[in-house]
Image: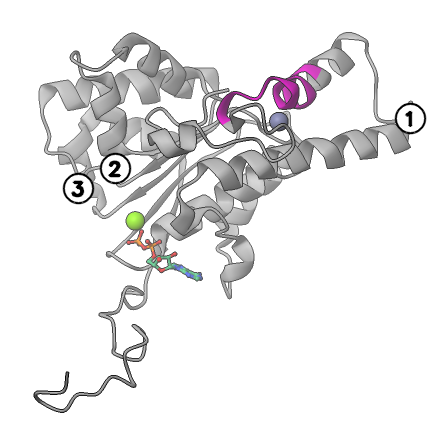
Amino acid sequence: MTANIALPARREQARCPEHPDQPIAHCGPCRSELIGRTNLDREHGMTDAADPDAAHNNLTRRRQIARNRWEALVDDEFATASLADFADVPREALAVVAVWNRGGDVVPWLRISGLTGTGKTHLMYAIGRAVVTGQRPVGEWIATTAPAMYAAMRPSAENPALARYRLQTTPLLLLDDVGVNKHTEWIEEVTHDVLDERYRRHLPVLMTTNLETADLKAAIGDRMTSRLRQRCLSIVLEGPDRRRPPTLEGLGLAALDLTVGAA
Ligand SMILES: Nc1ncnc2c1ncn2[C@@H]1O[C@H](COP(=O)(O)OP(=O)(O)O)[C@@H](O)[C@H]1O
Ligand SMILES: [Mg+2]
Ligand SMILES: [Zn+2]
């Protein structure tokens, strides 16, 4: 269960809260509960209707495991980002979550654009969390940035073929800051390789970008932009930059003695 293609070492080693002898990124017991059980139920044709109480407990349990994994593996700044943080959640965001929860339909892709600091990354992770911990809990997902994705696929990387395969096949991909890399043939090619395969497999992508459509086209190429037009809902965030320069109060320095020459 690789959650992130380039986990900082600290997270790679983070312990499972329920099985402290296991790293949460690869916790065997959690893995079998989260993934194994779903598959077993399917194989044995167990339906929720057969035993609603057991199904409910099973779901509650799997949501808990999915939440543990999300909070342990997502960057601290966004680990608890929630749709509840938004005064009005864009309908497109709710649609992605609803379609995932319902199952059976092709989940739309989502592009969140807007200027720096408008909350794009926060919203993307809030949606990811709702999806992963919802009615169909997700054990395998990748949440990363476009630059980290390209770094993992560079020929000099540790295992570029594996990184590419995971990016192409993970059930849910969250990709932050698409378009910040300068356009090159290689960038266009690998972006296409990953996104086109996901498109064909009907696997969802949530992404953020600073770029307008025209600039995004220049960054990731024509072919991919036309794919996005077919599959991707769009949310444009407006409003002020939420990252304000710090104030003395904010830094807890308001009571500092500012007398020149004070020791
Ligand atoms: N709805 C929100 N509620 C609380 N904090 C938010 C919200 N949206 C954004 N933030 C915080 O504001 C900061 C900037 O948001 P971020 O999502 O990083 O912006 P962007 O990705 O558009 O540059 C982050 O620290 C983020 O966690
Ligand atoms: Mg961001
Ligand atoms: Zn565990």
State the residue position of label 1.
51
Kind of residue at disc 3: Ala
Residue 233's x, y, as percent?
A: 41, 41
Residue type at the position of mark 1: Asp
Q: Give the residue at x 41% y 33%.
A: 11
Which callout, 3 or 2, points at the residue further toward the start of the chain? 2
**Amino acid under label 2?**
Val
Residue 135 shows in this picture: no
Location of mark 2 (residue): 178
238 or 35, which lies in front? Answer: 35
x and y percentages locating residue 31 in the rendered image: 61, 20
> Which one is in front, 45 or 220?
45
User: Disc 1 versus disc 3: distance between alpha carbons?
Assistant: 53 Å
Q: Residue at x 60, y 17 (%)?
A: 28
Q: Is 225 colored magenta in this rendering?
A: no
Q: CA distance from mark 3 to mark 2?
A: 13 Å
